[in-house]
Image (cartoon, rainbow, N blue to C red):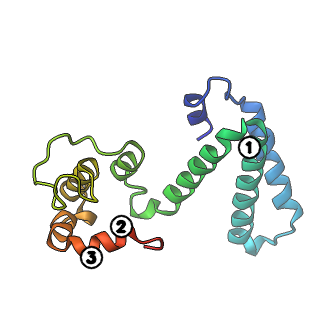
Amino acid sequence: MLTDLTNVSSMYQYSLKYFKDIFEKAVKSAEAAGYEKNQKKEKRIYWVNQFTKSLYENVSRSLFQRHVLLFSFLLCLKIMDENLLADGGLDMAELRFFLAGATQVELTKPNPTGEGGWLTDKSWLAILEMSSTFAVFKGLDDALAKDTKAWEKIYASANP
């Protein structure tokens, strides 16, 4: 995750010593918390939480303010991926789609709101791609085309 920050700016290169120091402080903190031998799971959870908090605080201090939110997002994705590990982790194709957007350029079905409607062709292309690529969105395009009035209410709502 820290290595991902070098893609944002080459100056975000952290040494192994920096990471090791944060790691050791978290270990000492867990030891000082006084968990008994029969509380190994609680001690591990405490340590992971302390390490994550310490890593976040230390790295955030070293980032430009405009990159702190990006780092927070990367850390959140890493935690989510770890929590979903038993189920195979995050779906990287869905994540890539979320981050990069649609790549489909040809309308395989006409925009149900018509030309100049509330739904742009670009948004409709994204819906078509989502419907054909991801099982969780299968049929979304047909549902939207079937009841455009209801979907427009959701689209135009201040609190959808």
Describe the element under mark 2 as helix, strand or loop.
Answer: helix
Residue at 21%, 42% in the rendered image: 104
Q: CA distance from mark 1 to mark 2?
A: 35 Å
Reading the chain from its start, which is encountered first: label 3 or label 2?
Answer: 3
Q: CA distance from mark 1 to mark 3?
A: 43 Å
Residue 13 versus residue 50 in the image, above or below: above
Depth order, front residue of 131/31: 131
Residue 23 versus residue 114 in the image, above or below: above
Q: What residue is pinned by disc 3? A: 150
Depth order, front residue of 54/36: 54
Q: For residue 127, what is the image quadrant? A: bottom left
Image coordinates for residue 65, horizontal then vertical, percent: 72, 40
Describe the element under mark 3 as helix, strand or loop.
Answer: helix
Determine crowd level at label 1: few under 14, some 14-19, many 20+ residues with C-alpha closer than 10 A: some
What amino acid type should be assigned to the residue bearing mark 2? Tyr
Image coordinates for residue 115, horizontal then vertical, percent: 17, 52
What amino acid type should be assigned to the residue bearing mark 1? Ser
Q: What residue is pinned by disc 2? A: 155
Image coordinates for residue 160, horizontal then vertical, percent: 42, 73
Residue at 70%, 30% in the rendered image: 14
Q: What residue is pinned by disc 1? A: 60
